[in-house]
Amino acid sequence: MRFGKYLKVAFANRWNLLAVVGGAVFALISPSPDVLLPIVAAGELAYLGLIASHPKFQAYVEAQEAKETRAASSESVQQTLDRITSSLPKELLDRFVALRTRCRELQQIAAEIQQTGNAEVHVPLEHFQIAGLDRLLWIHLRLLFTQYALNRFLNQTSEQQIQADIKRLEVRLAELPKDATGDQQQRVRKALEDNLQTSRDRLANLQRACDNFDLVKLEIDRLENKIRSLSELAVNRQEPDYISGQVDQVAASMLETENTMNELRFVTGLDGVEEAPSLLEGDIVPRPRVKQLN
């Protein structure tokens, strides 16, 4: 399967296509096309087999494919970032910006310490550590958006109304004759049963949102404290491997939280995006709505 992919890429190369077309045209206009055309075809097959099986060409194809995948993923992540920053109320977005600013200030302190210290000491907050903090900041930002979306959902959804709908539908179903066989009555029963199940699903979603609302707020506080601690650690402890391990431990401890956010997609509409955008070093232009969080 993979070899077929390499053959396809090798054949679609513009220089190869030019050579094949040129060779075929030359063979057709020559006095002996029946001899030259098979030679051109054999040469093309030999070329494709040689190129497609070459490790360097295969590595090039895989690298290009990975690059395209990353580009598509980056575009999707950027769209999600734009949606979050333009939707979050000001106080929640300010909360994220303050945490990000704190990390950047500590990053600057670490750089200044490095400039005045031993030149042989590794620079704190190296690129792989920044990537780890970016991931944690990304989880933090998505948690803030989850809190905001849950708050809106809970404010706009009435548990009493859903329960009243369930009771009303149960009463109507109970009033239908149990031994009814008419098509019209069967259709009515099916419609009521479907509506009742939908209402029960809505109530279950609402209860799940209520259960997770306080949990999300606690997780935001926990993660903020962890991120501050890691940033301070990068300044005070000149051990990049240790710091990186601590970042990974915190990220691993957030797996259950990320699973919870994925389960709440029916409220947030956020996909389970794995790649984190550049939040610590990149520029973020917040465009918050005027509406505030209640």
Image: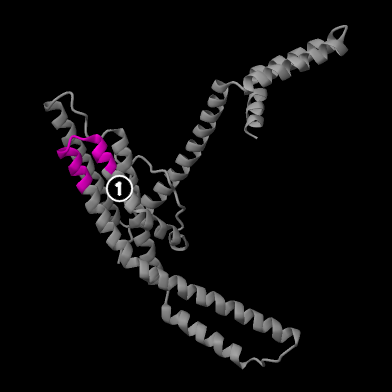
Residue at horizontal 54%, vertical 21%?
56
In this rendered view, identify the residue nearer to me: 216 or 4. 4
**Residue 66 seen in the figure:** yes
Q: Which residue is at the front of the view, 260 or 239?
A: 239
In the rendered view, tell whether residue 172 sits above or below residue 143. Answer: below
Where residue 161 sits in the image (x, y, percent)?
Answer: 45, 81
Q: Is residue 47 above or below residue 77?
A: above
Q: Amino acid at mark 1?
A: Gln
At horizontal 27% and vertical 33% (from top left) the residue drawn is: 126
Q: Quadrant of the C terminus?
A: bottom left
Q: Is residue 284 visible?
A: no
Tell me the SS state at disc 1. helix
| Magenta span includes 241 | yes
Quadrant in the picture for the N terminus: top right
Q: In the drawing, does residue 213 fall left or right of residue 103?
A: right
For the image shown, how many numbered marks are present on the structure?
1
Residue range of the region highlighted in magenta in the rendering: 229-245
Q: Quadrant of residue 11?
A: top right
**Which color scheme is applied?**
one colour
Q: Is residue 253 left or right of residue 25?
A: left
Task: From the image, tell me which residue sits under label 1.
Answer: 249
Q: Position of residue 35 (x, y in %)?
A: 85, 11
Report the residue at 48% width, 37% height from top.
70
Q: Is residue 256 magenta?
A: no
Q: Give the residue at the far top of this rendering.
A: 31
Please give left or right for residue 25 compared with residue 141 in the image.
right
**Residue 170 picture location, percent across and down:** 55, 87
Spot the residue most to the left.
116
Q: Does 17 sit above or below residue 238?
A: above
Dot 1 alpha-carbon crowd within 10 angstroms: few under 14, some 14 to 19, many 20 or more = few
**Residue 59, horizontal then vertical, whole percent:** 53, 26
Main secondary structure found in the magenta portion:
helix
